[in-house]
Image (tube, rainbow, N blue to C red):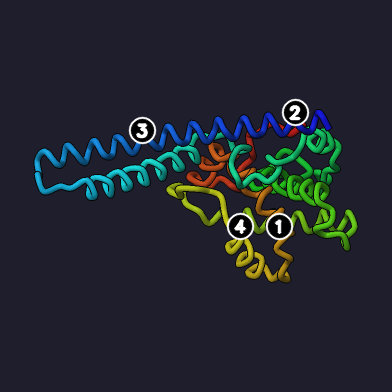
Amino acid sequence: MRNWFGTAGIIVIVLLVVLLIFGVLFTLIALIGLGLGRVVGWFSPSFSYFEATLLATLFAFITFVLLRILARLFLPAELLPDNSSAGWTSEERERAANYQLIPQERFYSSAAERTWEAWFKAEVANDVYAEFQHAPQAAANLNQSQLQELSIRLAEAGINIVKRKTGRARRLSTNLNDLRRELNRMGQRPYDDHILRLALSAINMNLNFFEEPLREVIRRQEWDQPSTMPESE
């Protein structure tokens, strides 16, 4: 019980600090906006405090949007909401090291066959498979062989979506509707949303993590060329 209160106290303190920082930043942004309003007021005497407040609100909104964009560009992939495994506990992360992998032969059997597409399919499929092992209730009616096959199909759907992107795409990550449409295009039956969300998490996690080399592959259209990525341990 004492440990619980200690943990709760730490959480409360962290939340208070975050709220304090947010309050300070919001106040600074509002003051800057009001300052800009008064500067405009010097040139236009009819400019009121109400209009200055509207300008401050607009300034705060633009700043918020820019901060979100910068966070998407520079934060590590594991800190982004696309990655569901970011919420795993340390115990769950330790168990993840013991997750089974899909046999490599399902993707390639030689260095020549280890193309960028085959390599990325193996990475995504194994992470989808790990998600199913982490949340076995999502597909409790399937055995391990069927789960592996499902993981590969879902990975293929995600890769098909990425392969249609151009080098000028702002983001490589995909969404639930795109995944549904691609599975339908592949002739696959509709899957439960829980299954699709687990797959989407693994797909986007890999797209974020490997974004730099994947953009080069997309730009040069080298999906069928041998991958230069090192073998996963």
Q: Position of residue 41 (x, y in %)?
A: 14, 41
Q: Residue at x 79, y 49 (%)?
A: 129
Q: Find residue 6 and name its label.
A: 2
Relative to 205, 122 lies left or right: right
Q: Label 3 belongs to which residue? A: 28
Q: Earlier in the sequence, mark 3 or mark 1?
A: 3
Could you tell me how far apart the alpha carbons at marks 3 and 4 are, in whole angstroms? 46 Å
Relative to 54, 135 lies left or right: right
Secondary structure found at label 3: helix
Could you tell me how far apart the alpha carbons at marks 1 and 4 are, in whole angstroms? 10 Å
Q: Find residue 160 and name its label.
A: 4
Q: Is residue 187 above or below residue 16?
A: below
Secondary structure found at label 1: helix
Q: Nearer the viewer, residue 17 or 217?
A: 17
Q: Find residue 56 and name its label.
A: none
Callout in the foreground (2, 4): 2
Q: Earlier in the sequence, mark 3 or mark 4?
A: 3
Q: Label 1 belongs to which residue? A: 154
Q: Earlier in the sequence, mark 1 or mark 2?
A: 2
Q: Nearer the viewer, residue 102 or 42?
A: 42
Type of amino acid under label 1: Leu
Type of amino acid under label 2: Gly
Secondary structure found at label 2: helix
Q: Nearer the viewer, residue 66 or 199?
A: 66
Could you tell me how far apart the alpha carbons at marks 2 and 3 are, in whole angstroms? 33 Å
